[in-house]
Image (cartoon, rainbow, N blue to C red):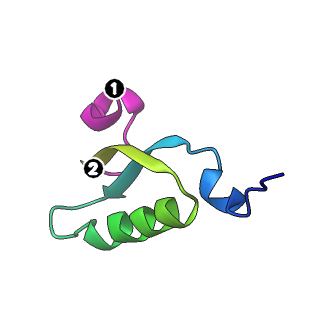
Amino acid sequence: MLRNHNHNLKRNTMKVALFARVSTADQDNTRQLNDLHQIAEQQNWTVSAEIKETISGAKANSEREAIT
């Protein structure tokens, strides 16, 4: 009887979208995205999209082009 000892390699993969937001044009979301990509890799998730936004978090969703 054959047994699969690589069960961790066959975990279900999940598709995820990464979301990074900064408040001003002077800020950069590169570190946020790098951290999120690292987490996705550790969790065996497939990154299907990156959403980047430069807008105040206090804005209404209708004003946020990246998530509408």
Query: What amino acid is found at the position of numbered circle 1 in the picture?
Result: Thr
Q: Are marks 1 and 2 in contact (CB under 8 Å)?
A: no
Query: What amino acid is found at the position of numbered circle 2 in the picture?
Result: Lys
Where is mark 1, residue-wise?
68
Res 57 seen here? no
Asked if residue 13 is positioned above or below residue 21 in the image, the reply reads above
Q: Is residue 37 magenta?
A: no
Where is mark 2, residue-wise?
52
- What's the residue at 44%, 63% (across, down)? 36
The C terminus: image quadrant:
top left
x and y, in percent, of residue 65 in the image:
25, 32
Which is nearer the eye, 52 or 35?
35
Q: Which mark is residue 31?
A: none
| Quarter of the view holding residue 66 | top left
- Real-space Cα distance between discs 1 and 2? 12 Å
Asked if residue 35 is positioned above or below residue 11 in the image, the reply reads below
Q: Is residue 66 left or right of residue 11?
A: left
x and y, in percent, of residue 2 in the image:
77, 53
- What's the residue at 34%, 63% (across, down)? 33
Q: Is residue 33 left or right of residue 25?
A: right
Range of magenta residues: 56-68
Q: Is residue 65 magenta?
A: yes
| Quarter of the view holding residue 29 | bottom left
Q: Secondary structure at mark 1?
A: loop
Nearer the N terminus, badge 1 or badge 2?
Answer: 2
Instruction: Bin the neighbour count of mark 1 within 10 Å (Cα to Cα): few under 14, some 14-19, many 20 and up.
Output: few
x and y, in percent, of residue 9 in the image:
60, 58
Q: Secondary structure at mark 2?
A: strand
